[in-house]
Amino acid sequence: MYGPRIIVMGVTGSGKTALARRLSERFGVRHVELDGLNWEANWVQAPTEVFRERVAEATAEDGWVVDGNYQKTHDITWPRATMMVWLDYPLPLILWRLGLRILRRAVTRERLWKGNQESLWKHLCTKDSLILWALHTYRRRQREYGEAMGHWESEGVKTLRFGRPRETERWLRAL
């Protein structure tokens, strides 16, 4: 039996990974977190070829849920998707959630992929801030994802766009 192949998309901090985990548990398929395949120790990005190979291998199965915003892998995952879920939440909500996540990870010293850790300094005082990244990419992602959803819907892929977390929760409860 084939499982669903779901892409969860949204701007940094929208809750992609949390939703993808829940969907993977619900459907009993693999959760593929693109950040985990992209980042090496000390926040070094994997070479593009290595990253793409990892993504191809991780999505070779019949069912999976992918989360992440890496355009360099869209040609690998998007054409195989059976469903696309877009968390199109308001920017103030995303920034609030992102700020809380950064604070939690910094305080707890949570270890991420390959032992990496986030710091308050990095996200509040440097050009590598995820807060700045969310601000700079929000409008572009809305445009790109809107176009992508229209395209894939016309190709027969089930597309869902949620504007508020309560809409997402309602859908999850109905599954």
Image (spheres, rainbow, N blue to C red):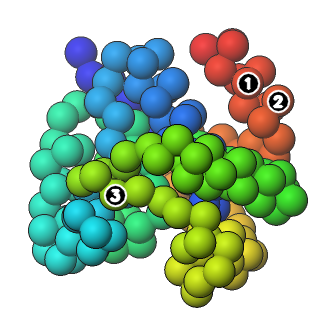
Q: Are marks 3 and 1 in contact (CB under 8 Å)?
A: no
Give the amino acid type for the residue marked by disc 2 in the picture.
Arg
- Point out the image quarter for the N terminus: top left
Where residue 167 appears, x then y in whole percent? 80, 31
15 vs 136: above or below: above
Q: Quadrant of residue 3?
A: top left
**Residue that badge 1 annotates:** 169
Where residue 135 appears, x then y in whole percent? 73, 75
Residue furthest to the bottom: 127
Q: How many marks?
A: 3
Tell me how far mark 3 sits from mark 2, CA to CA: 32 Å
Residue depicted at x 65% and y 20%: 172
User: Which callout, 3 or 1, points at the residue further toward the start of the chain?
Assistant: 3
Where residue 42 appears, x then y in whole percent? 28, 69
Q: Nearer the viewer, residue 147 or 139?
A: 139
21 vs 49: above or below: above
**Residue that badge 2 annotates:** 166
Q: Are marks 3 and 2 in contact (CB under 8 Å)?
A: no
Residue depicted at x 42% and y 18%: 25
Decide if residue 69 is on the left or right side of residue 19: left
